[in-house]
Image (spheres, helix red, strand yellow):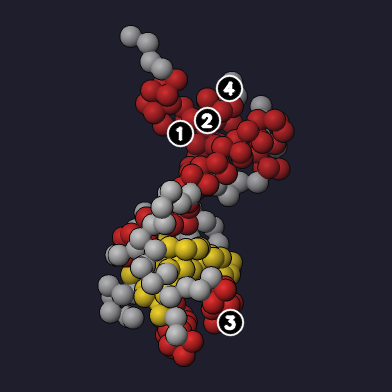
Amino acid sequence: MEYSVTAAVKKEGLAGILAALLGNIPDETLTALLDEGIRGLTNITPAELENMRGIGRDKALRLLAAIELAKMLATAPPGEKPVVKTPEDAARLVMEEMRYLDREHFRALLLNAKNQVIGQEIISIGTLNSSAVHPRELFKNAIKASAAAIILVHNHPSGDPSPSREDIEVTRRLVEAGRLIGIEILDHLVIGNGKFESFKAMGLI
């Protein structure tokens, strides 16, 4: 029985995807790419790829384009504006992209009065374990978009979504600023590797 290309790729997982994208490459290069895993490949640079035996510029660009396409598909909004009713709804919108980031990204989901997502803003990009967030940067874009509410989201590159003391302090400061401005912060999600924590569910908001 013959397998289609799609079936073969699914059966072989990441190795099948790399083989379909890159064709014949040395075993040592394939092993190195597999060792990187999904998380590593999303952060690999063009120079690192080109320096691997058997890759070169064309294959490096092909792989990087596939990675960017996967990111776009993971975050592409559906035809209608998604509605966020639960922390799980919000997490689904950002998990597949943010779980693999190697720096802390602080983002905001902007909601209208019907809890529909009308925008997603990157507020700051930090280091391995912190990101600076100022209320001015958060609420400037929310006001421009006429947002009624905000859900804060940031990732922990360690994969552990447990909120830090700094996360709690920053959230309290932003919640207070939102009350003054009239834009409610409904929740703050901390994204780990395939799991998340909700400040609302934890009673921290």
Q: Position of residue 158 (x, y in %)?
A: 45, 61
Q: Are marks 3 and 1 in contact (CB under 8 Å)?
A: no
Q: Are marks 1 and 2 in contact (CB under 8 Å)?
A: yes
Q: Position of residue 103 (x, y in %)?
A: 55, 62
Q: Badge 2 is on which residue?
A: 18
Q: Amino acid at mark 1?
A: Leu
- Tell me the distance, in whole angstroms, between the alpha carbons under discs 4 and 3: 49 Å
Q: Nearer the viewer, mark 3 or mark 1?
A: 3
Q: Which of pointers 3 and 1 lies earlier in the amino acid sequence?
A: 1
Q: Quadrant of the C terminus?
A: bottom left
- Tell me the distance, in whole angstroms, between the alpha carbons under discs 2 and 3: 43 Å
Total number of numbered discs in the rendering: 4
Tell me if 45 is positioned left or right of 205 in this view.
right
- SS at circle 2: helix
Q: Badge 3 is on which residue?
A: 136
Outermost residue, top direction? Answer: 1
Q: Amino acid at mark 3?
A: Arg
Q: Which of pointers 2 and 3 lies earlier in the amino acid sequence?
A: 2
Q: Badge 4 is on which residue?
A: 23
Q: Amino acid at mark 4?
A: Gly
Q: Amino acid at mark 2?
A: Leu
- SS at circle 4: loop
